[in-house]
Amino acid sequence: MNAEQPSGPPEPTEAALPADAVSPPDDANDLRGFHFKLLLGKVLTWVLIGAFVIAGGIAGAVLVGPIIGAAAAVGIFLVGILIVFGIADSRAEDSFFQTYATQRGMSLTGRQVLPPATPLLRRGDDRYAERTLTGPLADGIEGVLALYTYEEETTDSKGNQQTNYYRYTLGMLDVPESAARVPELYCQRKSGLRALEKFEDAFRGSKQRVTFESEDLLDRYEIFANENQDQNWLRQIFSPTFIVWLTESGLPDKFAFEFVNGTLCCYANGHKKKAEDLDRMSAAAAAVATRLREESLE
């Protein structure tokens, strides 16, 4: 499971935080104030803001009048502060992920393309990981955490184009031991009415729905596998303990997974930018991989 190399190395910024500056951040917003103060303390920041304020104020005064010129100067000043705040927010997020990666022995990279190994990774008109963290997801289990986005272009009846963005946090691992036993397995979040399931299944082609006796599982998930899949083996995978874990444990929001030809892709809604949420995704992905691997090796 090798991602394509990013377009270039991250540009050097002040995202790397001095060790004695603050305590390690718990989420991407913790260091926003630190970087905001750091930027406001730079002479260059005020020189740039001041230059635009003066230029805008003079232009407004000459073209319209002194009152408009003063209003323009104030407006440009406020916009300048907002821009500085936005830069601080971006640097705070960079600092958080760099610190998170270092603390957990992972390598951090920027935007790159992930291999199209599962259906989620093939969706949309464009798809990419905005950040990836590669390394241990649990003791002895290596994998990738990624902030993944895919885009879909739509056109309305008037010809206006719009881009829709769908964001997920992924936990990806290779589990080659299970590829022969279960070439494809999809554990998706429940959608639609149960009364329509038979109608929907008629259009699924070679994939068949797998049902279990657990009502909690059926209420939360839809599970599919190849039509020739050994059903008894699947039931061993979805043991009572594993079903309880899926339905009662503190999993990431809307957690689900896809397993195709040895590649496991676990995912949850949204880009997670808190340490506890990223840890939860790591643990969940590692747990699913361990369950598949253990059953395959028995």
Image (cartoon, rainbow, N blue to C red):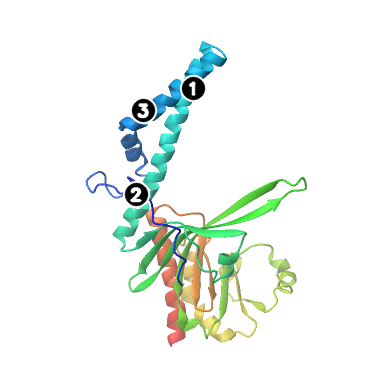
**Amino acid under label 2?**
Pro
Q: Residue furthest bottom?
A: 298
Instruction: Describe residue 150's horizontal placement relative to residue 83 as left or right.
Output: right
Per the image, the residue denoted by label 3 is 47
At mark 3, the secondary structure is helix
Which residue is at a point 53% across and 14% down the rendered structure image? 62
Rendered location of residue 188, percent (x, y): 58, 67
At mark 1, the secondary structure is helix
Instruction: Describe residue 149's horizontal placement relative to residue 293 as left or right.
Output: right
Q: Residue furthest top?
A: 66
Where 195 falls versus 274 (above or below)?
below
**Amino acid under label 1?**
Gly
User: Is tag 1's residue or tag 2's residue first in the polypeptide sequence?
Assistant: 2
Where 88 falls versus 168 (above or below)?
above
User: Is tag 1's residue or tag 3's residue first in the polypeptide sequence?
Assistant: 3
Give the numbered dot on residue 12: 2
Which residue is at a point 31% across and 33% down the rendered structure image? 42
Which residue is at a point 51% across and 11% down the rendered structure image? 66
Give the numbered dot on residue 56: 1
Q: Distance from label 1 to label 2 (Cα)?
A: 31 Å
Bin the neighbour count of mark 1 within 10 Å (Cα to Cα): few under 14, some 14-19, many 20 and up: many
Rendered location of residue 71, percent (x, y): 51, 18
Out of 199 and 214, give the one closest to the viewer. 199
